[in-house]
Image (cartoon, rainbow, N blue to C red):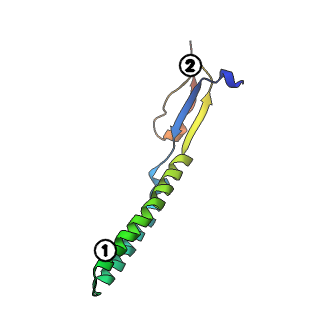
Amino acid sequence: MSINKIQNYRFVCTLTFGDIYGQIIVWLITVTVSLASALALMGARRPVYALATVGLVVVLSIPFLLFAFVTTLLNHIELTAIEPGTKTEPIPGNVSQQQPVQATS
């Protein structure tokens, strides 16, 4: 098949909640630990350190969380070339099970 004959592409995102579930759990643990350390620092003479600790942990962890989400999303995007005249129809159920269907004329 020549590259000139390819005119259509099938774009499918196979990302599910289970793919990012672990990332969300790790980030929630990170935020919980930072809040626990902030509560421990609240008893200190300067509670500003407690707020700075929470802010620093959250601000430093958000870029890593976004990087993990974006790379996971990009890893689950499929771009497949299909021949002209091929019609794709979504199959009920799992999105990742879409198959090209040959059009009849």
Along the viewing direction, whichever of 19 and 44 lies nearer the viewer: 44
Query: Relative to residue 54, is residue 102 depicted above or below?
Result: above
Q: Marks 1 and 2, Cα distance to the nearest angstrom?
A: 62 Å
Along the viewing direction, whichever of 20 and 5 lies nearer the viewer: 5
Residue on which disc 1 sits: 51
Where residue 31 sits: x, y (%)?
Answer: 38, 69
Q: Secondary structure at mark 1?
A: helix
Residue on which disc 2 sits: 103
Identify the residue shown where x is 60% and y is 23%.
7
Tell me the kind of residue under disc 1.
Leu
Identify the residue shown where x is 39% and y is 75%.
33
Picture quadrant of residue 35: bottom left
Q: Is residue 4 left or right of residue 29?
A: right
Identify the residue shown where x is 66% and y is 21%.
5
Confirm or deny contact between disc 1 and disc 2 (CB under 8 A).
no
Where residue 22 sits: x, y (%)?
Answer: 47, 61
Q: Secondary structure at mark 2?
A: loop
